């Protein structure tokens, strides 16, 4: 497995990953364009990919402009291997190195994504049709210390 920053040349592969997930309300390709992806990884924030045998199998993108997690997707056959956790860690570490502003995300209720973010230390703040989570710098650092006491 190789984790690295996403490049514009990864967008086609990232879109394929986005459309293979089982729980994704944005599966209509017209809802998230290649141009949207390019803007988010080059102007609004940053993205990361995980490659296995040269193929992108997961990616994450954080948006500094709106202070939210724009994407974290993984091909279903690669779930349970720690890839999502590492993409999440890379994204969150980078985000809090750029700003101390609260970061948020939304996901559908009763999904694996909701469970994942709860396990990663996110605080649920709204549950009306969509689950909204928030994370601040202090809670992120505390979460990291709980999972890796050697980490500074």
Image (cartoon, helix red, strand yellow):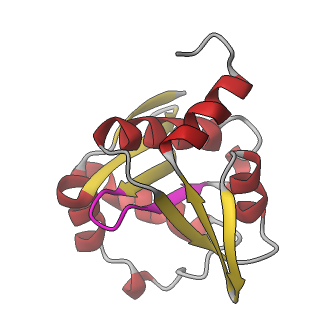
Q: Is residue 148 above or below residue 30?
A: above
The residue at the point 66 percent across, 35 percent down is 143
Q: How many marks do you count on the picture?
A: 0
Which residues fall within the magenta stretch?
63-74
- Which percent across, then down, holds residue 55? 47, 42
Q: Is residue 151 above or below residue 117?
A: above
Relative side of 115 to 130, left or right: right
Nearest the camera: 127 or 108? 127
Relative side of 110 to 53, left or right: right
The residue at the point 37 percent across, 45 percent down is 100
Q: From this viewpoint, which residue is outermost toward the top?
A: 150
- Which percent across, then down, holds residue 40? 28, 62
- Which percent across, then down, holds residue 125? 66, 71
Within the image, what quadrant is residue 147 found in? top right
Q: Is residue 122 above or below residue 143?
A: below
The residue at the point 40 percent across, 40 percent down is 96
Quadrant, the N terminus: top right
Within the image, what quadrant is residue 120 found in? top right
The residue at the point 47 percent across, 42 percent down is 92
- Which percent across, then down, holds residue 128? 70, 88
Q: From this viewpoint, which residue is outermost toward the right?
A: 110
Within the image, what quadrant is residue 41 found in? bottom left
């Amino acid at each position: 497995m190789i984790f690295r920053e996403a490049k514009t040349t990864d967008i086609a592969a990232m879109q394929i990953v986005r459309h293979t997930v089982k729980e994704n309300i944005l599966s209509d390709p017209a809802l998230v364009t290649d141009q949207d992806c390019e803007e988010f990884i080059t102007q609004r924030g940053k993205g990361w990919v995980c490659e296995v045998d040269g193929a992108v199998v997961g990616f994450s993108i954080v948006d500094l402009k709106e202070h939210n997690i724009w994407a974290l997707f993984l091909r279903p056959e690669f779930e349970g291997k720690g890839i999502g956790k590492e993409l999440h860690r890379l994204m969150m570490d980078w985000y809090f190195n750029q700003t101390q502003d609260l970061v948020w995300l939304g996901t559908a209720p009763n999904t694996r994504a909701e469970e994942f973010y709860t396990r990663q230390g996110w605080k649920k703040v709204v549950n009306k049709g969509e689950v909204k989570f928030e994370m601040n710098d202090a809670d992120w650092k505390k979460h990291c210390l709980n999972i890796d006491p050697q980490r500074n």
